[in-house]
Image (cartoon, helix red, strand yellow):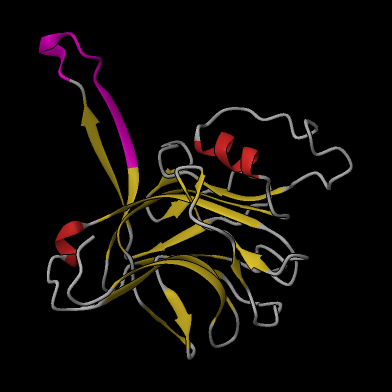
Amino acid sequence: AAAQTIQLYVNGVPQNEPVPFTATPWKASGNLQVGRLWASATGKENFAGTIDEVKVWSRALADTEIAHDAWLEDEDISDGTAGDPVPALVAKWDATDMANATGTTVNDTSGFGRNLALNGAVLTQFTTGDPEIGEEVTTTQTMTLNGTSAHATATGPVVDDSGSFTATAWVTLDPAKLADTSKAYAVQVFGQSGASQSSWGVWYEQPAGSTQ
């Protein structure tokens, strides 16, 4: 927040330089939106594909912390960040955790109890591994959205977006939903909504005439 910039990371790697954020931050009071943009008091720009491991922190994380989170490794937050506020994990929804993701609910395992309600989004299980060639067979699960109306919401606000915070998720686009290159696409992964629109969000844009 102090630097007034936004930085995008993909697989833990920063993409180009931070982008100046010139708008005045404002404190949204609505629900966290996953899989759609909230604008003009309605949901739009629905995401088509899978979303998992959505996390939100109460401060901006350092590059090393983002990288270690992407690698699913532990990070000693006192290493090189002495004196900084300790980040609080304020929300975590993991569709692969089949004990906490069933039916139309993905439980918030951060301890804050902001469970994610699925609205058209479905929990899809799939199996990998071939026992005939000695591979271990494992079954996992993800949240799948249809790109038209499916979304998920959690009671918010999850973060104070007038200050620093970090939000992450694993995302896979559905190529079939973006195959018509004569069209432009804009789909939101997640963001926090206010009364009539989202105060911030992460989304994917594909201009007409381009490919993924």
Per the rendered image, the range of residues in magenta is: 130-141
Q: Report if residue 139 lies within the magenta region.
A: yes
Image coordinates for residue 31, horizontal then vertical, percent: 57, 71
Of 102 and 81, the residue lying toward us: 81
Q: Residue at x 61, y 76 (%)?
A: 30
Q: Residue at x 71, y 77 (%)?
A: 27
Q: Residue furthest front?
A: 17
- Residue 194 appears in which quarter of the rendering? bottom right
The quarter of the rendered structure image containing the N terminus is: bottom right
Q: Residue at x 58, y 55 (%)?
A: 167
Q: Residue at x 35, y 76 (%)?
A: 45
The quarter of the rendered structure image containing the C terminus is: bottom left
Relative to residue 181, is residue 188 drawn left or right? Answer: right
Of 46 and 117, the residue lying toward us: 46
Q: Report if residue 106 lies within the magenta region.
A: no
- Is 109 rendered above or below residue 156? above
Q: Is residue 61 visible?
A: yes
Relative to residue 203, is residue 87 drawn left or right? Answer: right
- Is 31 rendered above or below residue 104? below
Q: Residue furthest top?
A: 134
